Structures are given as structure tokens and as C-alpha cells.
Image (cartoon, helix red, strand yellow):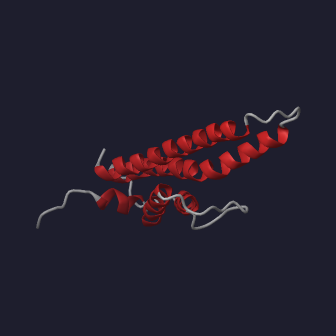
Amino acid sequence: MNRAEFWCRVLGWLQVAGAALVAGAIYVLWTLIFGWIVIEDAGFLTVAKWIVIVTFAFPPLLSGVLAYIFAERVQRARLGMRDEQHVFLRVVTALAGLWSAGVVGFVGLHLPPVGFFSLLGIATAIIAVMGADWTADLFAPRRGPA
């Protein structure tokens, strides 16, 4: 494992962990704020809670999972399987990173960026646009003059 592959994996795991923390924080805050309200049929509040959780936590989760999958492609490029473009994965990963950063929105779900996720999302979009070959060579040791 080289540094480029390692940092792609770290980028993915940070986003997944951050999404889990955000989902947990929203769940706890929702319980503290609305938990004292006694309603016979609390279906609306339950649906609203999960809509808020998915809206805030799904973009970084998706971006993190795709960054981790992209790390596998970087590893394959480092091992010599070059010139595999993976166009669909690159496009979806770049869009997920931009969605996580708050640059683009899908199906009406668009939120302002939440600082740390913005940086991670932009980094995910950059590595996806540049491709696995470029990312694998990013931290490769320099070769001296021949």
C-alpha cells in the first residue's frame, strides 16, 4: 500500500465515520428536543426525523464509500493494471463528492456545506476527476535521471 492508496482509504473512512457521527448526533438531539412530546401516533415525527438524518448524513456516507471503492482502483493502478478508465465510477464519485461538499444537489436535496465535509468532498471529487492512474502516481517515489 502506498501513500496515495492509504490517503484515499483514510478519506473514505473519515467521511463514513463523520456521517455516522452526524446521524447519531441528529438522532440524540431529536430525542432530546421532541422526546418529551406525547403523541398517540408519532408517525409524522418519526418520518421527519429520518428525512433529516438521511438529508444530512447520506451525502458524506455515499462519498466516503465511493472514495474507498476508488482506493481499490488506485491499488490496481499501482500494481500495473493501468489505463482502466472506470468512467462511471469516476463520474459518480465526483458527483457524490460535490454533493457532500454542498456544490451540487440531487432530487431537491441540497444543503449548505458543513465545513469538514466540504473539504473531504472536494478532495474526493478531485481524485475522481484525475483518475486512478494519476492518483497512484501522486505520491510515487521519484525516479532519478536514467
- Tell me which residue sits at (62%, 51%) in the image: 56
Q: What is the quadrant of residue 137 in the picture?
A: bottom left
Q: Quadrant of the N terminus?
A: top left
Q: What is the quadrant of residue 107 in the picture?
A: bottom right
- Residue found at the far front of this picture: 36
54 horizontally vs 90: left or right: right
4 horizontally vs 47: left or right: left
**Where's residue 57, x and y in %?**
60, 48
- Tell me which residue sits at (62%, 37%) in the image: 28
**Where's residue 142, x and y in %?**
18, 61
13 horizontally vs 61: left or right: left
- Tell me which residue sits at (36%, 59%) in the image: 135
Q: What is the quadrant of residue 77 in the picture?
A: bottom left
Q: Quadrant of the C terminus?
A: bottom left
**Where's residue 41, x and y in %?**
88, 34
- Picture layout, residue 86 above or below residue 6: below
Count the marks.
Answer: 0
- Tell me which residue sits at (72%, 43%) in the image: 50
Q: Nearer the viewer, residue 81 or 118?
A: 118
Q: Nearer the viewer, residue 30 or 146?
A: 30
Q: Nearer the viewer, residue 16 or 146?
A: 16
- Residue found at the far left of this picture: 145
